[in-house]
Amino acid sequence: MNTVGSAHNVRILGSGETTVVLGHGFGTDQSVWRYLVPHLVDHYKVLLYDSMGAGTTNPDYFDFDRYSTLEGFSYDIIAILDEFNVTNCIYVGHSISAMAAAAASIFRPDLFRKLVMLSGCQLRQEVSNTEDYYGGFEKEELDQMYEAMKTNYESLMAGMAPLVIGSDLDSTALQEFSRTLFNMRPDIGLCINRTLQTFDMIPYLPQVTVPCHIIQSSKDVAVPMGVSEYLHKNLGGKSIVEVMPIDGHLPHLSAPDITNPVLLRHIQQDIADA
């Protein structure tokens, strides 16, 4: 009989009283944390998992209706933590997983001690230029991107990958991201992209009361700088922002020598002590 843990390839490493949960972003899998994990296992219990739809998961388990909304991924996080009796964890989430964990913390704040949000994705993809939030695209632009993805998914993803990584075409980080990106089934990748384009986290931010550590690259083609500041101002609990002087949406893969010390500091220190 399938369990949540086996469906998501859950692995638990290390030891310690506190559990650190690592959630990856779109186009990757749990292997993206390979440079961070060795720094954690001597001090923490570390739970890694693959988000449904990653190339390492069984595509037969991917429910297109469930994962057409961010809540589908949030409920998965809750189910994983419940199955492994994890409460009061430190959740480190990249991109969409950071937002999914934020939503999960509204439903079940007892599961999270704090969220470390690395390169959190756009809060609302459809354009919303207000006094304190600037970002997103016009609806027509989103529809055009989606139609282009439906007809030419692989070539568009291949063109996007170097921009997302922000590194040379022959870099190890780009090669690794391309491997996991194209390990996803195209129709599943398209569905998750559509979810990224349509979810709207802005109305729910005041309900996120778990402390949030917001970490971002200074140049990220996927996430404008204003997103982090908007999060900081509108979350319902304590938060802190740190901008790293590096390029790219996957700094834990492309620049681990800079990113790991920052992540470790935010894992180890609470906001009051930072």
Image (cartoon, helix red, strand yellow):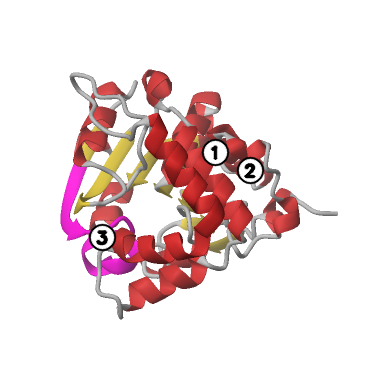
Q: Residue at x 59, y 59 (%)?
A: 186
User: Badge 3: how crowded within 10 Å, few (<14), some, or many (20+)?
Assistant: many
Q: Are marks 1 and 2 in contact (CB under 8 Å)?
A: yes
- Give the structural element (helix, strand or loop) at label 2: loop
Residue, x 17% and y 47% (percent of image)? 243
Kind of element beneath mark 3: helix
Three-letter code, disc 1? Thr
Secondary structure type for disc 1: loop
Q: Can you give x and y, in whole percent of width and height, for residue 34 in the image?
A: 43, 69
Residue type highlighted by circle 2: Asn
* Residue 232: quarter of image: top left
Q: What label does residue 85 carry, if any? A: 2
Residue 255 x %, y %:
25, 67
State the CA–CA distance, disc 2 to disc 3: 29 Å
Of mark 3 and mark 1, the one earlier in the sequence is 1
**Disc 1 target residue:** 87
Give the CA distance from mark 3 to mark 1: 26 Å
Q: Which residues are magenta?
A: 242-260
The amino acid sitting under disc 3 is Thr
Is residue 259 depicted above or below 232 in this figure? below
User: Can residue 101 be seen in this snapshot?
Assistant: no
The residue that appears at 70% across and 57% down in the rendered structure is 59
| Residue, disc 3 | 259
Measure the C-alpha gap from mark 1 to mark 2. 7 Å
> Residue 194 — which label?
none
